[in-house]
Amino acid sequence: MGKQRVLILGSTGSIGCSSLEVLAGLRDDFEVVGLAGGSRWRELASQAVTWKPSAVAIDCEAGGGHLSREMGDSVRVFRGSGALVEMIEGVDFDCVIVGVVGAAALPATLRAVELGKRVAIANKESLVVAGALLSEKAKASGAQIVPVDSEHSAVFQAMHAGRAEDVRRVVLTASGGPFRTWSADRIAQATLEDALQHPTWDMGPKITIDSATMMNKALEIVEARWLFGLGYDQIDVIIHPESIVHSLVEFADGSMVAQLGSPDMRTPIQYALTYPARLACPSPRLELADLGRMTFYRPDAERFGALRIGREVARVGGTSGAVMNAANESAVALFQNGGLGFREISTTVEEVLNRHDTRQNPDFSELMSADAWARNEVLRCNSCF
């Protein structure tokens, strides 16, 4: 059997760079055949020089021009808004790592699933927006959707300890973000600088802000609903500041099976690539004797209303996931630009959801319409919130 051919979408971001670190240790079994980035063409060009893929993709036209000149005839360059899908369709590959943040990754993710590939998905938004559709397409094509999020990777691993029908619930752990111990009044005054000070994980700004609002955990509730075929009432969240227990599964007999490890994304990335095999990994080893103690707390729904939103969207389904995700992306962008206060991120998302008439069993075009409507609604009603 030859080497597994890998595409990395979002190769210049946090997940992409960690993926390349992992693949550096797996060169005997894997080869990188495609890299894709957003607008940072110089970094993408540097990666291409090192990894020598057959293709690169960039969704920035101007950057694409620079990249084409830099690459010459040695590497095929896809550029523009459809570049990711074009690379998915134009390059022979076995597995794609989806590390692009936001709903922008959905078309390429959907196409990879339709082609029956292994999709190592770090992009929770795709499953939040179109979880039912992706699940349906994967069943038809034989594609494998393997989670890269540390929490969902932990659930994926722990579920192998029993039968799916014997799962009582899954419990997603959350670090609590930078505001875990802050009062509601203090959180209301939080600045962008405050929100970007995550105590445990090194992530991009959007994901870090989602962690501060706990909207990341709301998105993960919806993601788990579709990824594992769970009922909305089978998914709980617990605060675990040490981020050592990455999540757990409780079975019908009361047994709980958890996955523990250092807070390092390279472990779930590698497992998504090598599953079901487990190979030596560059992540630091966990020494239990050095931990001292681990703590767990119930989340405070009053201070972090995003969790309530996530549970409701997991219950309702349909186009509500697309609206939730789009409204959050728009609200976070406004917060980053000074157009919204920190607490207004979650209240904006909830208000837009309340204005939405959910459509059940939506197709792709209906999901995209709901996405566009939610983004416009945030901007139109911003002055009302």
Image (spheres, grey):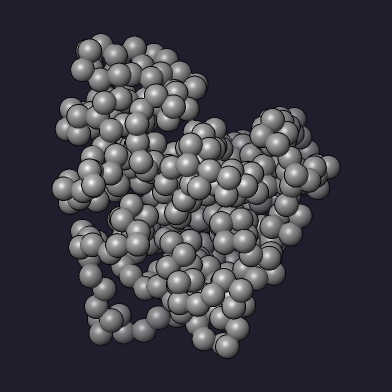
Name the residue at the front extreme.
Answer: 1
Q: Position of residue 173 (x, y in %)?
A: 50, 69
* Above or below, 325 relative to 69: below
Q: How many numbered marks does the figure carry?
A: 0
- Of residues 181 and 92, the one nearer the viewer is 92
Q: Position of residue 40 (x, y in %)?
A: 34, 27
| Residue 186 in sight from this viewpoint | no
Query: Which quadrant holds the C terminus?
Result: top right
Which quarter of the picture shows residue 366?
A: top right
Q: Residue at x 43, y 42 (%)?
A: 117
| Residue 384 in sight from this viewpoint | yes
- Of residues 146 and 234, the one nearer the viewer is 146
Q: Position of residue 162 (x, y in %)?
A: 50, 77
Q: Is residue 69 left or right of residue 347?
A: left
Q: Residue at x 21, y 58 (%)?
A: 282
- Of residues 82 and 132, the one nearer the viewer is 132
Q: Position of residue 47 (x, y in %)?
A: 23, 32
Q: Is residue 379 left or right of residue 120?
A: right
Which quarter of the picture shows residue 68?
A: top left
Q: Residue at x 83, y 42 (%)?
A: 357
Q: Residue at x 59, y 40 (%)?
A: 329
